[in-house]
Image: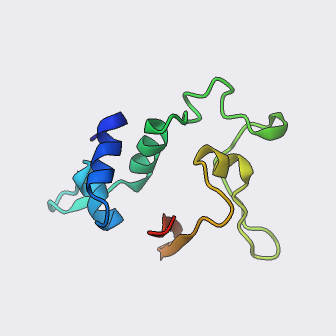
Amino acid sequence: MLTGSELIAKIKELKGVSESERVLACGYFSKSKNGKKRKNYNAYYKAIAEAQGYKSSSDNETGGIGKGGRKLSYIATVQGNGNLLIGKAYTALLDLKAGDEFEIKLGRKQIRLLPTKES
């Protein structure tokens, strides 16, 4: 798996290639028993964030504490009105800005947010 400046360089090199192909090309996958490659998007995005200078909650000196001194739980709960709120502390960790767009991928009891090409 590529990390740091090597990861950033490879991503730039693969501009225009699908996110799925970039994950594989950067080595963020495992093989199942039948030999099929299973992409590890979480590790991939975490490595990108770390390569850009963001610290993960385990590396963070504050121990994953957000604004107001509350420890980040990395758990989101669906609200009574059906909304799912992520929160500013998490978007700040990934340097997301107002207007950033994501493609919503629904899986079996899971939601993945993939940055659109414009983001």
Q: Taking the image as drawn, is residue 101 in sight?
A: yes
Left of 54 or right of it: where is 71? right
Whether residue 28 appears in this view of the structure is no
Q: Nearer the viewer, residue 29 or 101?
A: 101
- 58 displayed left or right of 13: right
- How is the protein colored in the picture? rainbow
Q: Residue at x 73, y 63 (%)?
A: 85
Q: Is residue 95 left or right of residue 35?
A: right
Q: Quadrant of residue 58?
A: top right
What residue sits 31% from the left and 66% below the top? 16
Determine whether 6 is above or below 111 in the image: above
Give coordinates of residue 15: x percent, y percent. Answer: 31, 60
Q: Position of residue 68 (x, y in %)?
A: 85, 38
Outermost residue toward the top in this view: 61
Answer with left or right where residue 32 lies relative to residue 52.
left
Task: Give the residue drawn at x 63%, y 47%.
Answer: 74
Q: Hey, which residue is sitting farthest right in the picture?
A: 68
Total tally of numbered discs in the picture: 0
Name the residue at 31% across, 68% down: 18
Quarter in which the N terminus is drawn: top left
